Image: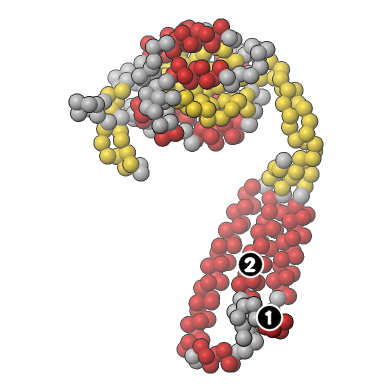
Amino acid sequence: MYQIEENIYFYLLLLIPILVIGFLYVSWWKKKARKQFADAELLDKLTPEKSTFKPIIKLIFLSLGIAFLVIALANPKMGIKLKTIKRQGVDIVFALDVSKSMLAEDIAPNRLEKSKQLINKIIDQLGSDRVGVIVYAGSAYPLLPITTDLASAKMFLQMANPDMVSDQGTAMNEALAKAMTYFDNDEQTNRFLFVVSDGEDHEGNTAQIAQQANENGVRVFTVGVGSPNGAPIPMKQNGVFIEHKKDQNGEVVITKLNETILSEIANEGNGKYILGNNTNETIDEIEKIITNAEKKEYETKEFSDFKDQFQWFIGFGLLFLILEAFMFEKKTKWIQKLNLFNEK
């Protein structure tokens, strides 16, 4: 497994496209200047030893040399030993509602983006805990299996959107059932499920499934995002507003936060309903819940004894720079004889 010590040096790779653009400009300028001096046939006679392909090869060598040296500056490291580490933490699964109603903008920027911000900030507060993510609308979709890689959880979370689930609606019961498959350790007593939703268009037996989850040792918490007064659902194409969603009668649909069903689900799941509109208050409350939970010890495997690998990249970088320096732009005699590049 690799680690990168200094990612910031990768910005130096921008030198390569700048170099290519400069090469193309200089080639165009030279060609233009030569045309003013003489025609192409005469120029070929005046410079019979000039190669047409070697400047390109030199550019490739120079680019590769720069690329390898930049990677060396970033100092990649490789883990050479896999060891088992004991940690203490809780298992947390987030079930995120990505139905169309979550696009309502009664909470800025909209309910879905607000929900993703909340989950991101909660993940930032976690330590040795494990996290999984499920998205759901008309059906539930496992976005990320339960993992200790919190950075990956945040990355996958940013991908969540209504287009990920083709069926519309709010299959919260299916999301709860799928979440149960995430908790693979029967001895894990500190297992939490956070359902982040506006509670719209739920199916009737969700509270019953929450009760079953609690009986299996999973506490179900709900986080409501939206306003009781509701808001229309904007329909957009490529980020541009088209119209508000309408029902079969042509009336604009108003979607409202359903706190009643969310509270009922949390009560049956031995959890708590939390209004998620105020970010700081929501984060503080959830952090207290997780902090006060009993930490269960579990084992995880991680790479250790990371060794620097920059010397290999320095070697390859210097090799390509030396090749570039010692390659002349005139034609090579033995290649001319093979005529591989049509240089005769």
Q: Residue at x 30, y 30 (%)?
A: 233
First reached walking from the N terminus: tag 2 or tag 1 = 2
* Residue 223 visible, this angle: no
Q: Which residue is mark 1?
A: 338
- Image height check: is 179 above or below 268? below
Locate residue 28 relative to residue 309 in the image: left or right. Answer: left
Q: Residue at x 74, y 45 (%)?
A: 77
Q: Residue at x 31, y 23 (%)?
A: 255
Q: Which residue is mark 2?
A: 60
Which quadrant of the structure image shows residue 301? top right
Crowding around mark 1 (Cα neighbors within 10 Å: few <14, some 14 to 19, many 20+) is few
Crowding around mark 2 (Cα neighbors within 10 Å: few <14, some 14 to 19, many 20+) is some
* Residue 34 visible, this angle: yes
User: Mark 1: which amino acid?
Assistant: Leu
Could you say whether the residue bearing mark 2 is in a helix, strand or loop?
A: helix
Locate residue 137 relative to residue 192 in the image: left or right. Answer: left
- Image height check: is 64 above or below 35? above
- Image height check: is 114 above or below 64? above
